[in-house]
Amino acid sequence: MTKIAVLGNGSWGSVLGSMLADNGNDVVFYGNNDQVNAEINQYHTNTHYMKDWQLNPATTATADLAQAVTGAELVLLVLPTAAVRIVAKQLRPVLTKLGIKPLLVTATKGIEPGSKKLISEILTEEVYPEDTDKIVAISGPSHAENVAKKDLTAITCASTSEANAKLVQRLFSNDYVRFYTNSDLVGVEVGGAVKNVIALAAGILVGKGYGDDAKAALMTRGLAEIGRLGVQYFGAELSTFSGLSGIGDLIVTCTSVNSRNWRAGKQLGEGKHLSEILDTMGQVVEGATTVKAVHELCVEKGTDMPICAAVYRVCYEDADIDTEIKQMMGRSPKPEIRL
């Protein structure tokens, strides 16, 4: 039995932690919401995030970070991008005091605005500056609601250490979730993060009444933008974006009502303002944060990402959606295959 601390007990954190307990591991959740912690401990439910569903009864929750990670061989971070650096700064002295160096696994999909850093880069800076091989990212077409129902799911786990990727693969896999390993850590993270921006755009098209042709074009060209950013800025391998964290995650996030980013985009297309949508969503819309970082990267490097640029202008410059679509369709002719 492996002791695993799950930092973040929202929908995806709860489902992953419960699944890991089902797999025979000792799982403790860490979160700062006392009401959620109490509900998990007393009733083994988390109704704010996952209605009509029960966690594995062997799981427990605490607001004490040291208690959560004591004895942990693996720490799974399932936090909003904005919270990762904050918690990582708290985690490092705790691990130092305990004298342990657990594997860090991130299930967070985002890029930090300002620093323009991936989650693994934040964890390297704040926790393991000399142990980057102990960081693993998991990503792929997976919604908490589906995994909770034990729908068949495939996910990739990426690390610069093949051994650590294989360890995560062994601990997380079961008869309904299959994990594959990947050595392109940054590529897997870029795919998981930027597809949320494309999902906002996909929702916008649906909200504006466009059909299947438009959605297919949007996803295909969106994938080209993801690959362009990954290769040009982060040095990712282009082939990664043909995998689970690229096209796989893009498909599910751009087509499923379970996608918060798609739902937020649909409301944008229907005429609502982003601030109103974020206030009423009840959970984090990662694409709304990631698009800021992508915009900063495009300005800094001159990377051509017209879909992401248009989403940014709609979200933060009150740009007219119909005008943005017209301008995008009227861009100068380009070859299809290019970086």
Image (spheres, grey):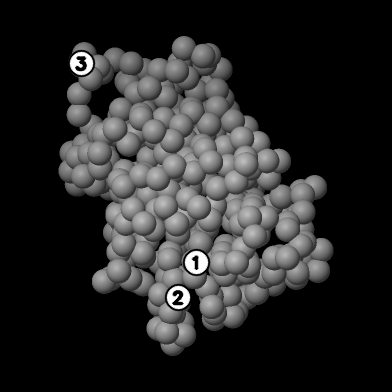
Q: Can residue 25 be spotted in the picture?
A: yes
Q: Nearer the viewer, residue 274 or 138?
A: 138
Quadrant of the image occupied by residue 216: top left
Question: SS of the residue at dot 1?
Answer: strand
**Residue assigned mark 3:** 335
Q: Is residue 141 above or below residue 94?
A: above
In the image, taking residue 120 as reference, residue 64 lies left or right, namely: right
**Residue assigned mark 1:** 75
- Categorize mark 3 by other alpha carbons within 10 Å: few (<14), some (14-19), many (20+): few
> Which disc number belongs to residue 91?
2
Choose the circle earlier in sequence order: 3 or 1.
1
> Which disc number belongs to residue 172?
none
Q: Amino acid at mark 3?
A: Pro
Residue 29, how many percent across, how many down? Answer: 62, 67
Quadrant of the image occupied by residue 6: bottom right
Q: Quadrant of the C terminus?
A: top left
Q: Quadrant of the N terminus?
A: bottom right
